[in-house]
Image (spheres, grey):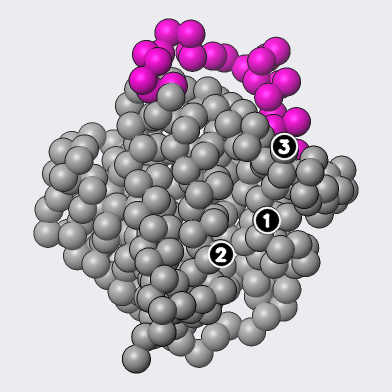
Amino acid sequence: MHTPSSKSGYLFAAGAVLIWSGFVLVARMGGTSSLNSFDITALRFAVAALVFLPLWWFWKRIPLFNKTVLSLALTGGIAYSLVVYLAFKHAPAAHGAVLISGLLPFFVPLMALLILKEPLRPNLRWALPVIALGMICLGVDIFSRSENTLVGDLLLITSSLLWALYTVLAKRSGLDAWGTAIGCALLAALMYLPVYILFLPKAIMLAPLGDILLQGIYQGLVVAVIAMLFYMAAMTRIGPARTGACMAMVPALAGLGASLILGEPLNAWLITGLLATSAGAWLGAR
């Protein structure tokens, strides 16, 4: 029987799932807009820094200039953002649904083994073959398409690896979720925005205001702040295992959204790949 706390925990988990599924769709919209990956990354950090700076100043002033926060800002902040937004210039959202979220249950334990020397959990013996099946189905879809998405797909795999690395480094850091999010966003903004303004190619002046607002608000506020709030609220109410299992819905939901909202074609191979990676992610998070 579910208590009121566990019911609210599942509601918060559902909110995080919807936001992270939406991330794939909104990032793809950015990829097909006139904004480039440098622009979207700048919008993400500028908005997130505006939100987090008062929290850092008045509430949680964690030290920013150290190796721990630097490693988080470089991996889960700057590198991940640049790679994932560039990937969606070259690959459809449904591929992102499979390759980012679907591979995380494989990449995170692998990074934990390499960096933290954590042994692989027994449930991965069941999860990894199912994820592999999803990858094979996606591979058939990729090579049967007329357009070449291979560059984008390789960038999506790289972004999943970077996020897995960030996840393990965040665990090793000893910081709580707020400290990780605030430190990563503020240091990334401090490092990236001056370089962007002075040196990097920009298309932001040519982009419609609607595209700028959508990417800035969704990436910098909804994903960076609200999804984290929902995720942490779910974790405290229903625990990490159940929350992780809920997150396994992201590939299937994002793939469905890619078809219904973005009009991307879904064939049997891609649908099977989405369902298999979701099932594998669920097995891996149990």
Pointers 3 and 2 in contact (C-beta within 8 Å): no
Q: Position of residue 83 (x, y in %)?
A: 52, 39
The label shown at residue 53 is 3
Q: In this image, 22 relative to 237: left or right?
A: left
Residue under the image location 48 percent in, 13 percent down: 203
Question: Image check: 248 left or right of 117?
Answer: left
What is the x, y in percent for residue 33? 35, 22
**Kind of residue at disc 3:** Leu
Disc 1 marks which residue? Answer: 178
Can residue 11 be seen from the camera position used here?
yes
Tell me which label, 1 or 2, sits earlier in the chain: 1
Q: Nearer the viewer, residue 232 or 189?
A: 232
- Specify the amino acid type for callout 1: Trp
Asked whether disc 1 touches disc 2, contact meaning CB atoms under 8 Å apart, the reply is yes
Quadrant housing residue 92? top left
Q: Which residue is mark 2?
A: 232
Q: Earlier in the sequence, mark 3 or mark 1?
A: 3
Q: What secondary structure is marked by label 3?
A: helix
Magenta span contains residue 261:
no
- Magenta segment: 187-212
Image-based side of 82 in relation to 245, left or right:
right
